[in-house]
Image (cartoon, grey):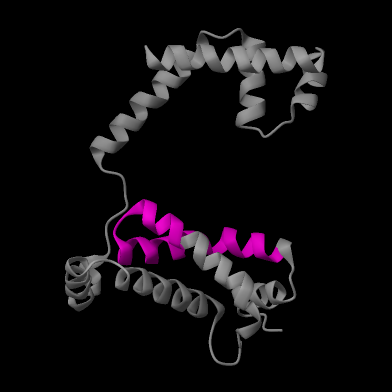
Amino acid sequence: MMTDDPVAELIIRVAAQDRAAFRTLYGQTSAKLMGVLLRILGTRSEAEDALQEVFTRVWLRAGRFDATKGRGMTWLIAIARNHAIDRLRARPTAVQVVARDAEDADPVEQVRDTAPTAETRMIAAGEARRIADCFETLEPDRAEAVRGAYLGGLSYLDLAERHGVPLNTMRTWLRRSLLKLRECLDA
C-alpha cells in the first residue's frame, strides 16, 4: 500500500467493502468534492444530491481504482466532475449553453470566495447572542442537558445518569427545553 497517499489507501480498503474506511473517506474528501460539484452545478441542493450519488459510485466502483495510475483524490475528483457534467448534459439546452460558457471562462474567476462577509459575521454574531440569551431562559440543569445531548453527543441514558433522574424524565426535560428554545427564537 502507498503511504504517501492516504486517500488511495482508503479507496483500496473501500474496495474490500470496509465501511469504516468509507466513512473516513467521506469525512476527509466530501468538502472538497462538494466544492467541485457546487462550482460546476451552481446550486447547493443539486450539488448535495450529486455528492451522494458520487459516493454511491465510489462504493460501487472502488475496485476499479488503480493507485499506479494516479492519486486517490484525483480519481475522486474525476468521478465528481464527470457526474456533474452528466447532470449538466441532462438539463435543457439553454442551461447547457450557460454551462459551456462557464467551462470556457478562466477557472480562477469561477472560484467563489467562501470567506464570510462582514455582514454575514455580524448576522452570525447576533444569532449566537440570541441563542445564548434563549439558553439563559432555561433552568441551568435543563440547559446543560440540552447542550450535552445536542452539542456533546451524549445519550439520553448518559444524561439521565449524570443528572440523577429517570430516563423518561430526561426525555421530557429535553423535549420541553427544545420547545421553550424554539418559542424564544421565534419571538
Number of callouts in the render?
Answer: 0
Q: Residue at x 34, y 24 (%)?
A: 126
- Up the image or down, 1 lies above or below 53; here it is below
Q: Quadrant of the C terminus?
A: top left
122, 100: nearer the viewer: 100
Position of residue 95 in the picture relative to residue 160 (left or right)? left
Q: What secondary structure is the magenta-colored segment mainly?
A: helix
Q: Quadrant of residue 7?
A: bottom right
Q: Residue at x 28, y 66 (%)?
A: 91
Q: Is residue 9 magenta?
A: no
Q: Residue at x 56, y 9 (%)?
A: 138
- Up the image or down, 8 lies above or below 161; here it is below
Q: Quadrant of residue 97?
A: bottom left
- Up the image or down, 138 lies above or below 131; here it is above
Find residue 79 and report its horizontal and vertical position in percent: 47, 76
Find residue 93 and report its horizontal and vertical position in percent: 20, 70
- Up the image or down, 165 lies above or below 74; here it is above
Q: Residue at x 67, y 34 (%)?
A: 153
59, 128: nearer the viewer: 59
89, 154: nearer the viewer: 89
Find residue 3 and report its horizontal and vertical position in percent: 67, 80
Residue 6 can be seen, yes or no:
no
44, 162: nearer the viewer: 44
Q: Quadrant of the N terminus?
A: bottom right
Instruction: Please provide the residue range marked out in magenta.
Output: 21-50
Position of residue 41 in the picture relative to residue 168 (left or right)? left
Position of residue 57 in the picture relative to residue 165 (left or right)? left
Residue 141 can be seen, yes or no:
yes
Find residue 174 and report its horizontal and vertical position in percent: 64, 17
